């Protein structure tokens, strides 16, 4: 029986669009989507709100829309659409939890999330997008942690566009960045201690196969996750690698 595994959250691209459908900011995390996805969202979603399939008006659309092989998950914040695009079978609830956390993070830097605010603070937004997502997977979204090493100040909404503080004003704290990044995380309590340091790793793989009535394989894919259970004291640096010799022996045994 074919089985499918739901990826927690895996974004291919993230768009910030205004009410006209123009792209204000964007970040591509994977090469499986193109800029044309933004145009598809403008045509099918934004313009589709005004005109229904029979020419009538439609007042509501679902926040998750499938167009072709892509899934759009979006949220409107004032006059801005935050649009996440993925081709994976992502967890929609976790995706919207991330979008909500992103909105709160942007508000902590420059107040209201509006079209003008994004244009005035595009440098800060791009720095944040590089930190909170890695190859489409969410990372740290805590404002308390990110503000410790992304020290550039945002322009508050309603300001006259004049920077009240230079982005290099916090250069004296640059030497502390490494310590803050590795030692300040919101998901691990400080002062953890175990009598015995141990790490357990489980590799869970899933194979999805689509077979025609005649028995021909139409599509097949394999996905997997590595689950870790950690009993380590403090905040140590841990390096985990695959055994090349074991992999070579397994390949030789499979070909015999």
Image: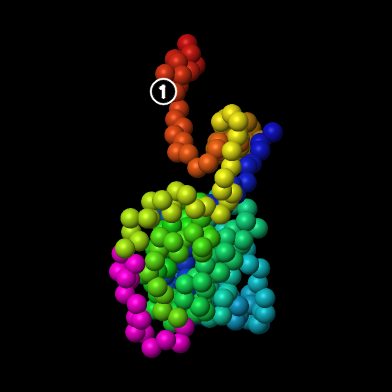
Asked whether the viewer can see residue 226, the reply is no
* Residue at 48% in and 39% down: 236
Q: Which of these two is toward me, 13 or 245?
A: 245
Q: Residue at x 56, y 80 (%)?
A: 78
Residue 8: x and y, percent?
60, 49
Would residue 158 be counted in the magenta stretch? yes
Colour convention:
rainbow
Q: Quadrant of the N terminus?
A: top right
Tell me the magenta residue range. Answer: 157-171
Q: Provide residue 189's location: percent of width, then percent of height.
A: 59, 49
Mark 1 Cα shell of 10 Å, populated few (<14), some (14-19), many (≥20): few
Direction from residue 31 to residue 101 in the image, left or right: right
Where residue 34 sits: x, y (%)?
42, 59
Disc 1, SS: helix
Question: Dominant secondary structure of the magenta stretch?
Answer: loop
Among the 4 quarters of the image, the one containing residue 120: bottom left
Seen in the image, is 121 located left or right of residue 94? Answer: left
Q: Image point 62% across, 46% down: which residue?
A: 6
Kindly identify the residue that appears in the image at 48 percent across and 13 percent down.
Answer: 253
Nearer to us in this view, 121 or 20: 121
Judging depth in this view, the residue of 122 and 222 nearest the camera is: 122
As drawn, the residue found furthest toward the right would be: 1
Which residue is the site of mark 1?
244
Numbered marks: total: 1
């Amino acid at each position: 029986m074919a089985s499918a595994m739901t990826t927690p959250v895996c974004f291919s691209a993230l768009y910030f669009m205004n009410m006209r459908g123009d792209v204000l900011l964007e970040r591509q995390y994977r090469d499986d989507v193109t800029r044309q996805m933004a145009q598809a969202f403008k045509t099918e979603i934004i313009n589709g709100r005004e005109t229904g399939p029979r020419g009538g008006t439609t007042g509501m659309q679902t926040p998750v829309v499938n167009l072709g092989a892509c899934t759009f998950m979006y949220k409107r914040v004032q006059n801005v659409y935050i649009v996440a695009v993925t081709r994976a079978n992502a967890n929609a609830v976790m995706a919207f939890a991330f979008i909500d956390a992103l909105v709160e993070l942007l508000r902590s830097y420059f107040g209201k999330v509006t079209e003008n605010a994004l244009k005035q603070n595009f440098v800060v937004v791009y720095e944040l997008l590089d930190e909170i997502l890695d190859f489409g997977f969410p990372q740290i979204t805590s404002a308390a942690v990110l503000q410790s090493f992304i020290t550039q100040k945002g322009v508050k909404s309603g300001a006259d566009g004049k920077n009240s503080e230079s982005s290099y004003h916090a250069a004296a704290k640059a030497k502390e960045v490494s310590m803050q990044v590795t030692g300040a995380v919101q998901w691990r309590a400080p002062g953890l201690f175990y009598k015995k340091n141990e790490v357990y790793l489980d590799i869970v793989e899933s194979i999805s196969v689509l077979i025609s009535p005649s028995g021909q394989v139409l599509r097949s894919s394999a996905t997997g996750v590595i689950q870790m259970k950690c009993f380590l004291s403090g905040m140590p640096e841990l390096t985990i690698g695959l055994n090349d010799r074991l992999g070579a022996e397994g390949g030789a045994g499979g070909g015999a």
